[in-house]
Image (cartoon, coloured by chain):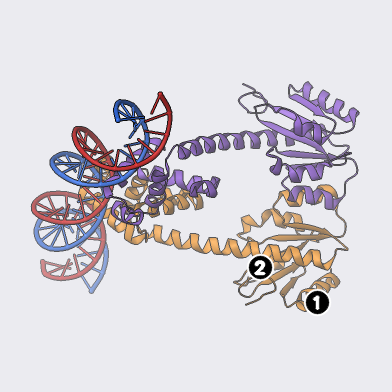
Chain colours: A purple, B orange, C red, D blue
Amino acid sequence: MDARNGLTGETIVYVVDDDASIRQALDDLLSAVGQKVRCFADAESFIVAPKDNCPACLILDIRMPGLSGMDFHRRMAGLGLDYPVVFITGHGDIAMGVEAMKNGAIEFLTKPFRDLDLLDAIQRGLAINEARRQERAEGEALLRRWRSLNAGEKQVARLVVTGLLNKQTAGILGVSEITVKVRRAQIMRKMEAGSLPDLVREMDRLRGLSPAELDS
Amino acid sequence: MDARNGLTGETIVYVVDDDASIRQALDDLLSAVGQKVRCFADAESFIVAPKDNCPACLILDIRMPGLSGMDFHRRMAGLGLDYPVVFITGHGDIAMGVEAMKNGAIEFLTKPFRDLDLLDAIQRGLAINEARRQERAEGEALLRRWRSLNAGEKQVARLVVTGLLNKQTAGILGVSEITVKVRRAQIMRKMEAGSLPDLVREMDRLRGLSPAELDS
DNA sequence: GATCTCTCTATACCAAAGTATAGGTCTCGT
DNA sequence: ACGAGACCTATACTTTGGTATAGAGAGATC
């Protein structure tokens, strides 16, 4: 338990900056407040590094040799990475800051910045990432349950949550009403839904998570 | 039909800037592309002005006598106003731009800016506002339907969408199962729900719109 | 006070949902 | 060829949901 940031377990801050002195300064600052840190000299080495399985936040320099911080930020989703990003830069301009925020950064600080501003941003980032990790874990569990349905059960599930009667569902699928009832029982069991409203919510959530998966 | 911006009807852009020459320039620019415009010299006069009932977007100067653009932006929600904001400023800095974006602005332009950048931002803003207006209209219709339920029907509705059986609902509320069935029929009619899944979705949407209202 | 409206309740009935058992068909691997 | 498992279907039954009709009681309106 860490009362400082309100998070319940360990967290980590990744620092990606080509300037060794900045890396050292950030490491010192964060270590001093008990925050675990890992530093990287460029985006490429961060990309390939194994990631810690805990809430995390990314401090990113804008100007770097190789992949720039801004470009890396844009490609993060495509790389399967999802960390709140705090930008730091020594030579930024307004358009750059605005662009970074448009891309979803949670903070954009210019050097020199106040330590407290950075620490505040990190706390916000860690809290956001913890919430997202929680959501993702629940979403993945839901997806596993959905994938445990066979093709026929999935068909019935899709139709049932639109409000169709078993008889109508059976007619559409060209199976007997009994079959629909049997599949329905399996659906409720496999999806761990205690009631039809529960199933409706699970299916709607699935639609939000991965519409394609729901059709498969 | 307006093929230029993909919107289906009339739209308006509000300009709030204390500099008369800027107001004139923006009026000219937007009028030239067929965009309706209304200009204001300060935030206060915009606040009290009657608003047009169509998709709208707000171009806001940061530095103004009286209420600054930034402060006005922060207070908009409290004033019951909801317009996408495009900031323009002649004397901004990075922190200001970042702050504006954190507060939800859709663009932050520094003078001189390219006309096309402004027009692009306006189109995005109008599209966002049109979608929000649509959502709000649907939400208000849903709220009207909910308010048409009497107290007993609301109680039943809240319990039914949790998955409780009529018998259980009746036990909790201390009424007969028949009463629950009658209320349920009224609920489906008044809420215009064709099935239980439909009702579940309407209730969940209400919870998102106004949790307090749902408990009343 | 008579009437009207709203709400709750009961009776009666039907349709739909859910469950259990059993048998049939098909595929797959041995 | 044979057994195992997955899936569909039928029969039979119970519970639940939904509707129609009608009566009782409370409260408002004239």
Q: Is disc 2 placed on a helix, strand or loop?
A: strand
How far apart marks 2 and 1 lie (CA) works out to: 18 Å
Q: Which residue is at the front of the view, B85 or A59? A: A59
Rendered location of residue A54, percent (x, y) = 65, 27
Describe residue A92's horizontal placement relative to residue B192 as left or right. Answer: right
In the rendered image, the vertical position of residue B34 relative to residue B164, given as above or below: below
Q: Chain of mark 1?
A: B
Rendered location of residue A164, percent (x, y) = 34, 55
* Residues tagged 2 and 1 counted as in contact (Cβ below 8 A): no
In the rendered image, the vertical position of residue B156 relative to residue D22, given as above or below: above
Q: Residue at left 49%, top 50%? A: A215
Residue A143 visible in the current orientation: yes
Q: Which residue is at the front of the view, A178 or A66? A: A178
Q: Considering only order in the chain, which callout, 1 or 2, is on the residue closer to the N terminus?
A: 1
Residue assigned mark 1: B28
Residue assigned mark 2: B56
Disc on res. B102: none
Rendered location of residue A102, percent (x, y) = 74, 51
Give, as a three-letter code, the residue at label 2: Ala
Give, as a three-letter code, the residue at label 1: Asp
In the rendered image, the vertical position of residue B21 relative to residue A46, given as above or below: below
Rendered location of residue A203, percent (x, y) = 45, 46
Residue B63 visible in the current orientation: no
